[in-house]
């Protein structure tokens, strides 16, 4: 025989190979068919899966009803949620069989029940229910199927394999459900909690008494409220002073139909009879006292928010302020509606309250029994109330409501100060424009771990405060790591979302509620002391929190500060020319920067709609070693004689508004960008605090320099994990950090004695990036404080 004949042709070899593969698949398929025949779930398993899913849906409806809080009572809440759940499941029973009639694969009734239950869970936990719904119903469905199989009368005659699988599914399903419950019950984790070593020299401690400590006045609490009272707010039914209702119906002309009628039914009044209610804390003693109004934000309509500032009322009254916590719960969302235009009405209502106080201040025998200094007024607010405080300051100087001239304003109250606690911004834009307010003191504070107002919107309003007059005005902001949204209000509490969504928040990193309120006590009291009582000794803590470090809880803080004496050099909004300054006649140059551009300042999501300068440097070569030939610098040349025209002296201060960014500076002259995945991994690493040299050049060529870190640390990006699942963070919050600006104040006196330094001859400001090998920063403003 020819030896080659035993080998066969290549075509025959391929046919034999394919035959073996087909035979193998047949063997596996036959085995799987026999295995499936032994364990195949019966009709009882399908019924069990359906009942398990329904049980999960019932639990979801119970949870949703428990936390719905329409205000009409718990049974109404339960009835609404069960009715909605039943409707969804019945609809699914109709629609799913219709779809399965086309597919002709799965059991119709059971599939409809399971699918409807998934939808119920999804809506009860929306938006995280997109993940929770399928997982919860799968676990409950498998458990139900396994238990139904176990309890079926024919289970004893089932194969051993089927028994083992049924028992295994019970164990695994119970473990999965227990794991889900443990996950929801936990506070989260401390993974990624930042710890930054601050290496800058500490400033001198503040030489003043702690403003967060109670003052010398005894206090009393009174109420004022609408005539006739209201069963929803019994505390206002017998007030010290009965007040008239106000007509806000013109603001709500477009709000009609059953939603408006339902709100009227709930509250007992419509928008033409909104009550002027407030709780007031009054100091007892001789003298006149400044007036402060505070208003809450949007919260559950039936869980009243105005009592949550009692801790501030008692402190401020003891220190000689009248504080009124204003009730605007009737403007909050609820009853399936969020009234249109209520953001603007919140601010208008504050001014209507001030009308009452003006009348009382003119009456020497006013029923409050207190002497009111109506020339010293502050308005404060939290969340939407923070935006309302700024809106009140805007409307105070206007003649008409911007969206309807038939609504006339005639207020012109002496509002000196505005406070915004974790405020909203941009929910109401008067006539579609940003809200610019003038000639008021402004202070805003924000928690970095605020999962409701998850980006620092108060900072945008801060940039929209300007000073057209000379005076002692100033504006400041404070950013607080590990502080959330709700703990500034004792009613709102630890979770920034109502339950059940609150179960998904990462609460473990949050500071103690009393610590967070201690910060509010200190800063809000100091701000009012400085702006209404004239206690200017408290100004340093608004420039640099470190001067009161011993009073504050241990965490990370960022300050920004500007006053009416500020002279702007550049804010990068004047034109698209990188080389121009906002101050006419100035010039900007750069050398060896691997990133230099101007563009919109980003929030965590979206942007501020105005610009900053993005500066990046990298003094490494392609081998990762430092290249001494790379000397990055950013230089601003001032216009001729501007330093003498501004009368710069050693008492003047160079002010830089800076933020460190969570991104890597590319190599100088890099040929290509990093791949997206690599860039994402790089952004997850811990970053060092950037440092650089601030060099000042004189007109005669003399040069002096100081490191930035001598005046304060520029913190690295503050990263936050909002929820227990990174996937939810990525979907909802998108970024772990956002640019938060710090003011680094550089007293020109710190250069005194160096190389004949003369502020009156100052010509150039150079940022020389020689102290940190690589970084990216964002510069929003550069200027001088001149006094």
Image: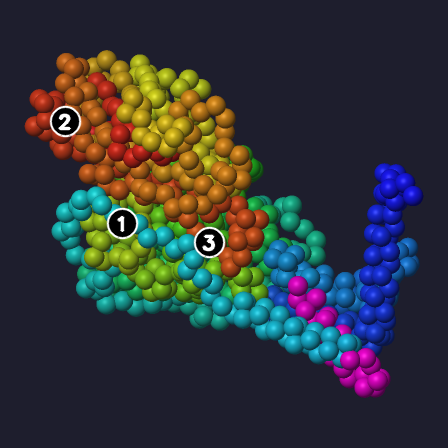
Q: Secondary structure at mark 3?
A: loop
Task: State the image coordinates of residue 136 (x, y, percent, origin top left).
Answer: 66, 66
Q: Quadrant of residue 751?
A: top left
Task: State the image coordinates of residue 463 (x, y, percent, origin top left).
Answer: 38, 36
From the image, which quarter does the N terminus lie in? Answer: top right
Q: Is residue 151 magenta?
A: yes
Q: Is residue 571 left or right of residue 283?
A: right
Using the numbered discs, state the Cα–Cα distance from disc 2 to disc 3 in whole angstroms.
45 Å
Q: Which residues are magenta?
A: 135-160
Task: State the image coordinates of residue 380 (x, y, percent, origin top left).
Answer: 37, 51
**773 over 169 or under it: above or below:** above
From the image, which quarter does the C terminus lie in? Answer: top left
Tell me which secondary structure the magenta stretch mostly adopts. Answer: helix
Looking at the image, can residue 512 be seen? yes
Q: Which residue is mark 1?
A: 197
Using the numbered discs, state the Cα–Cα distance from disc 2 to disc 1 in whole angstroms.
34 Å
Q: Residue at x 21, y 34 (%)?
A: 707
Q: Earlier in the sequence, mark 2 or mark 1?
A: 1
Which one is nearer the viewer's eye here, 598 or 3?
A: 3
Q: Earlier in the sequence, mark 2 or mark 3?
A: 2
Q: Nearer the viewer, mark 2 or mark 3?
A: 3
Q: Which residue is mark 3?
A: 721
Q: Which residue is mark 2?
A: 649
Q: Is residue 670 left or right of residue 730?
A: left
Which one is nearer the viewer's eye here, 85 or 220?
A: 85
């Amino acid at each position: 025989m020819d030896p080659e004949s035993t080998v066969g042709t290549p075509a025959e070899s391929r046919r034999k190979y394919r035959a073996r593969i087909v035979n193998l698949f047949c063997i596996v398929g036959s085995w799987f068919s026999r295995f499936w025949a032994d364990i195949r779930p019966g009709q009882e398993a399908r019924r069990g899966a359906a009942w398990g899913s329904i049980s999960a849906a019932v639990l979801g409806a119970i949870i949703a009803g428990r936390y719905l809080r329409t205000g009409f009572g718990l049974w109404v809440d339960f009835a609404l949620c069960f009715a909605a759940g039943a409707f969804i499941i019945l609809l699914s029973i109709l629609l799913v069989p219709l779809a399965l009639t086309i597919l002709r694969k799965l059991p119709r009734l059971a599939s409809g029940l399971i699918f409807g239950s998934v939808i119920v869970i999804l809506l009860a936990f929306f938006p995280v229910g997109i993940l929770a719904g399928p997982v919860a119903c799968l676990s409950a469905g498998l458990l139900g199927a396994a238990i139904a199989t176990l309890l079926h009368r024919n289970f004893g005659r089932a194969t051993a394999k089927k028994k083992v699988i049924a028992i295994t599914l019970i164990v695994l399903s119970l473990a999965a459900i227990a794991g889900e419950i443990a996950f929801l019950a936990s506070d989260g984790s401390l993974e990624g909690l930042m710890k930054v070593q601050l290496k800058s020299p500490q400033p001198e401690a503040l030489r003043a008494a702690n403003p967060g400590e109670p003052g010398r006045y005894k206090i009393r609490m009174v109420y004022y409220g609408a005539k006739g009272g209201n069963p929803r707010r019994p505390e206002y039914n017998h007030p010290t002073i009965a007040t008239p209702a106000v007509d806000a119906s013109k603001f709500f002309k477009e709000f009609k139909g059953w939603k408006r009628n339902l709100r009227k039914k709930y509250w007992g009044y419509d928008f033409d009879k909104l009550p002027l209610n407030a709780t007031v804390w009054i100091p007892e003693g001789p003298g006149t006292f400044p007036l402060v109004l505070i208003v809450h934000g949007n919260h559950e309509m039936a869980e009243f928010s105005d009592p949550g500032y009692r801790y501030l009322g008692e402190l401020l009254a003891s220190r000689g302020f009248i504080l009124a916590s204003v009730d605007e719960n009737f403007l909050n969302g609820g009853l399936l509606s969020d009234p249109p235009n209520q953001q603007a009405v919140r601010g208008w209502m504050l001014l209507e309250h001030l009308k009452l106080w003006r009348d009382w201040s003119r009456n020497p025998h006013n029923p409050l029994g207190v002497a009111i200094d109506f020339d010293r007024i502050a308005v404060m607010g939290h969340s939407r109330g923070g935006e309302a405080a700024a809106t009140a300051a805007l409307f105070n100087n206007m003649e008409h409501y911007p969206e309807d001239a038939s609504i006339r304003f005639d207020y012109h109250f002496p509002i000196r100060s505005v406070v915004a606690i974790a405020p909203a911004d941009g929910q109401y834009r008067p006539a579609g424009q940003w809200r610019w307010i003038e000639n008021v003191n402004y202070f805003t504070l924000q928690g970095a771990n605020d999962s409701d107002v998850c980006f620092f919107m108060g900072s945008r309003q801060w940039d929209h405060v300007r000073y057209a007059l000379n005076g002692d005005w100033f504006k400041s902001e404070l950013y607080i790591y590990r502080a959330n949204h709700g703990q500034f209000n004792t009613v709102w509490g630890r979770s920034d979302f109502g339950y059940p969504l609150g179960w998904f928040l990462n609460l473990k990193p949050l500071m103690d509620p009393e610590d967070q309120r201690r910060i509010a006590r200190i800063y809000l009291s100091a701000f009012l002391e400085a702006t209404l009582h004239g206690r200017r000794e408290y100004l340093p803590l608004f420039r640099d929190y470190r001067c009161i470090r011993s009073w504050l809880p241990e965490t990370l803080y960022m300050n920004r500060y500007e006053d009416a004496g500020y002279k702007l050099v550049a804010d990068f909004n004047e034109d698209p020319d990188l080389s121009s300054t906002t101050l006419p006649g100035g010039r900007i140059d750069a050398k060896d920067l691997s990133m230099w551009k101007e563009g919109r300042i980003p929030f965590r999501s979206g942007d501020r709609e105005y610009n900053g300068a993005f500066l990046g440097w990298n003094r490494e070569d392609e081998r990762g070693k430092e290249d001494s030939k790379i000397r990055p610098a950013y230089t601003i040349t001032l216009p001729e004689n501007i330093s003498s025209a501004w009368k710069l002296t050693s008492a003047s201060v160079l002010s830089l508004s800076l933020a460190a960014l969570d991104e890597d500076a590319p190599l100088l002259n890099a040929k290509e960008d990093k791949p997206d995945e690599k860039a994402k991994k790089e952004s997850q690493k811990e970053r060092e605090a950037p440092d650089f040299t601030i060099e000042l050049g004189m007109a005669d060529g003399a040069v002096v320099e100081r490191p930035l870190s001598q005046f304060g640390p520029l913190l690295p990006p503050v990263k936050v994990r909002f929820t227990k699942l990174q996937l939810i963070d990525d979907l909802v919050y998108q970024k772990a950090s956002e640019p938060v600006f710090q003011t680094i104040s550089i007293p020109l006196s710190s250069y005194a004695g160096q190389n004949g330094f003369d502020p009156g001859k100052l010509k150039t400001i150079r940022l020389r990036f020689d102290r940190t090998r690589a970084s990216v920063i964002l510069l929003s403003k550069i200027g001088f404080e001149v006094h």
